Image: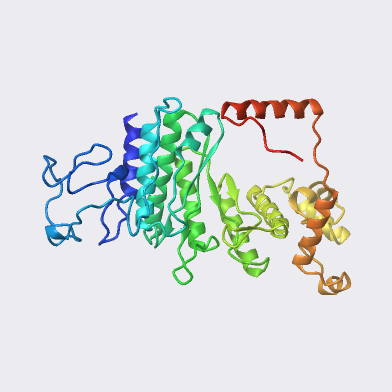
Amino acid sequence: MWVVVSILLIATSTLGSGLTEGTRAPVPGGIDVRRDTGTSIFATTISRDSHYQEKIVGARPYVETEEDLPEEFFWGNVSGGRNLLSPIRNQHVPVYCGSCWAHAATSSLIDRYNIQTDGDWPGPQLLSVQNVIDCGKYGIPVEFIAMPLSGFMAPVTLTGTLVQHTAETLSGVVISQLSSPGAPMLYGGSPAAFDIRYETTPMGAIETMMIDCAYNEIGKYLGIPTQAYISLSDAKHLDSQAGLESGIGATLAALSGINNISGPGMLDFESCQSLEKLIVDNEICGMTFRMVEGIEPKEDFPSIPHFKELLTEGHLLISDHTMKYRESELSMPGNVINRANLARWQADGETTVNEVAHAEVENLISTYEPTTLSDEVKNELVQLMESEAKKHGQDVLPQRD
């Protein structure tokens, strides 16, 4: 227990240390420090006149004299009334949940993030610890997605980014396992290198892929299944950039042994899902699956009989060895991968990869037949959903077509 709690403390203190010079450090938990009374909304006494002893002596870098201190300062009311603190959670209503430790950890983490980013993008955030706790309770696997950005919201070095990613992810691991020991989870993430030129987070950057593969090694070391946003592209169309970024990512992910790959079909960072790209990525996935199978001898030794047959017949197209192993050794892609020579491609209409992929999407949609469930099973599912909804104050389910 103490080891786990120590990890959580390390995780929260590590993330709280990323403040830049000249930024007042936030008080953990959103404590409202009032100079006039020295008391906070959490009945915590911190003032210059109290018995509280400073652990660090000497002037802060942003305070030159005592007069520089404001009469009153509250992170919940800065610059015209903006609130950079996470909301107060009540763990006693409607029932006592005993999760104050989890709420405190997530509030401390997200308060530091909101203060450091000044709540500008994409606005003040909230870490939902309850999702982690609920999923653990019902045995639903949780995918932890830490998103340190190298050179922006994380150290610029890949090693430094990995340290921060580890701390952030371990905080979720601790919450999950303290609430429900043995709860299923994925050691995942969506870290990225930060492109200062465009203020973007390129998921197709080689550094981003390197970080993904590296934290996968950390997850494997801890014995946790891994996940990564990789094999996707920052391109806006299904073009050369989309192909090279997705192909490199899929190859690295397969060789690294990442267990769950979130990326096929994605364009424009993580903002768009393209069905046409999903068709192409399906072929990329097939190639990587074949790659990880490796090269194994299959009745190749002794080799002399095979070469004697080649010399005698002039080819091995229909040899017993070829007929037995051709399908397992040589993968054949779908129509979206064109292996015809130029003359045949021209004769077939000179179609592009986008055109072929779009035609395949239309075909799959038009011929799709959903799996049918019996009315008995459907009614049982509806009853279960209605029962759960009523437990949480919802009397009627949303209307279904």
User: Residue at coordinates 19% horizontally, 54% vertically from top-left?
Assistant: 71
What sort of colour scheme is used for the picture? rainbow
18 versus 8 height, above or below? below
The total of numbered circles placed on residues is: 0
> Residue 386 at what x, y percent from top left?
66, 28
In front of the other: 371 or 215: 371
* Quarter that holds the C terminus: top right
Residue 259: tell me if it is visible.
yes
User: Residue at coordinates 72% horizontally, 47% vertically from top-left?
Assistant: 301
179 versus 49 height, above or below? above
Question: Picture quarter containing residue 338?
Answer: bottom right
User: Residue at coordinates 55% horizontally, 47% vertically from top-left?
Assistant: 258
198 versus 102 height, above or below? below
Residue 256: tell me if it is visible.
no
> Residue 296 at what x, y percent from top left?
67, 47
Question: Picture quarter containing residue 121?
Answer: bottom left
